[in-house]
């Protein structure tokens, strides 16, 4: 079925500006994450966060079609292919996230098993909620984002080398998601959807906690070196 570049019937100009800008900031974050992987041979995104995010992108790039317009369908696929690079490197370096004593192959099993599990869960979640209620994966996307934001924090705390974690990426993740939350609040179909708003607000608060921790822990580490 042919789609226009932008769906201007169901979404306003402001809807598109907020959502597209937020998505674009995530693309920049992905590129910087990949750059840092090549620099440090470490994945700053937690294993489970990678698996749930990749599952959502797999479904909404190739199984379901967003109703926002063709540009977003291809935008989701850009996310997917960038994430393929992250997945490839996670198979190489993901074991570094695990506590001592785990076999190096354990991270590959965890990533693969979790991805398949999330695929099944998110497929049926999307069929029941996202397809009839949003048409663009909003509810499932925010559940995934909330999980991601929550598990960034313990990975940061238990990792000794803070060079692995980018303050810029932390800001980009927060700002990109926050703009999408503003889109959810502005979008006429979701007026008064406080359940969806609460997911966005909780995600934003966790992202702010992560930003503050990255800043303070890096500052403390640099002070010790100085």
Image: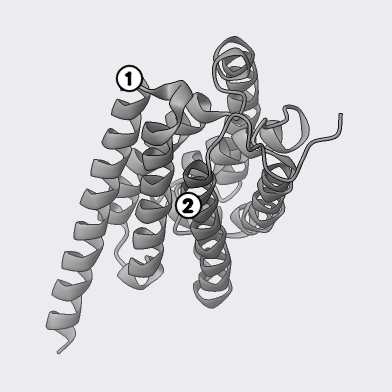
Q: Is residue 188 above or below residue 203?
A: above
Point out residue 100 in the picture as x, y percentages from the top left corner: 39, 51
Q: Residues within 10 Å of mark 1 (few under 14, many from 20)?
A: few
Q: Secondary structure at mark 1?
A: loop
In the rendered structure, the answer to whether residue 145 lies left or right of residue 137 reads: left
For the point 17% across and 74% down, the residue is: 219
Which mark is on residue 133? none
Point out residue 224 in the picture as x, y percentages from the top left corner: 13, 81
Residue 147 shows in this picture? no
Q: Residues within 10 Å of mark 2 (few under 14, many from 20)?
A: many
Which quadrant: the N terminus?
top right
Q: Report which quarter residue 127 is drawn in.
A: top right
Q: Which residue is mark 2?
A: 22
Q: Secondary structure at mark 2?
A: helix
For the point 60% across and 30% down, the residue is: 136
Q: Is residue 145 above or below residue 179?
A: above
Which residue occupies the foreground of this view, 93 or 51?
51
Q: Which residue is mark 1?
A: 192
Tell me the distance, in whole angstroms, between the alpha carbons under discs 2 and 1: 21 Å
């Amino acid at each position: 079925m042919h789609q226009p570049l932008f769906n201007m019937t169901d979404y306003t100009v402001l809807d598109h500006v907020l959502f597209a800008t937020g998505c674009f900031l995530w693309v920049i974050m992905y590129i910087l994450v990949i750059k840092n992987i090549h620099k440090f041979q470490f994945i700053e995104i937690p294993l489970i966060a990678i698996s749930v995010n990749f599952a959502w992108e797999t479904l909404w790039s190739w199984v379901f079609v967003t109703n926002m317009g063709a540009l977003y369908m291809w935008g989701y696929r850009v996310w997917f292919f960038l994430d393929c690079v992250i997945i490839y490197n996670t198979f190489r370096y993901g074991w570094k996230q695990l506590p001592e004593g785990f076999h190096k192959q354990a991270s590959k099993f965890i990533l693969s098993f979790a991805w398949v599990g999330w695929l099944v869960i998110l497929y049926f979640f999307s069929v029941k909620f996202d397809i009839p209620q949003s048409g663009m994966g909003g509810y499932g996307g925010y559940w995934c984002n909330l999980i991601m934001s929550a598990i960034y924090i313990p990975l940061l705390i238990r990792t000794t080398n803070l060079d692995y974690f980018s303050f810029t990426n932390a800001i980009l993740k927060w700002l990109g998601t926050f703009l999408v939350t503003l889109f959810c609040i502005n979008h006429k179909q979701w007026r008064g959807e406080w359940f969806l708003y609460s997911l966005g607000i909780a995600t934003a608060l966790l992202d702010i906690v992560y930003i503050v921790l990255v800043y303070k822990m890096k500052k403390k580490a640099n002070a010790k070196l100085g």
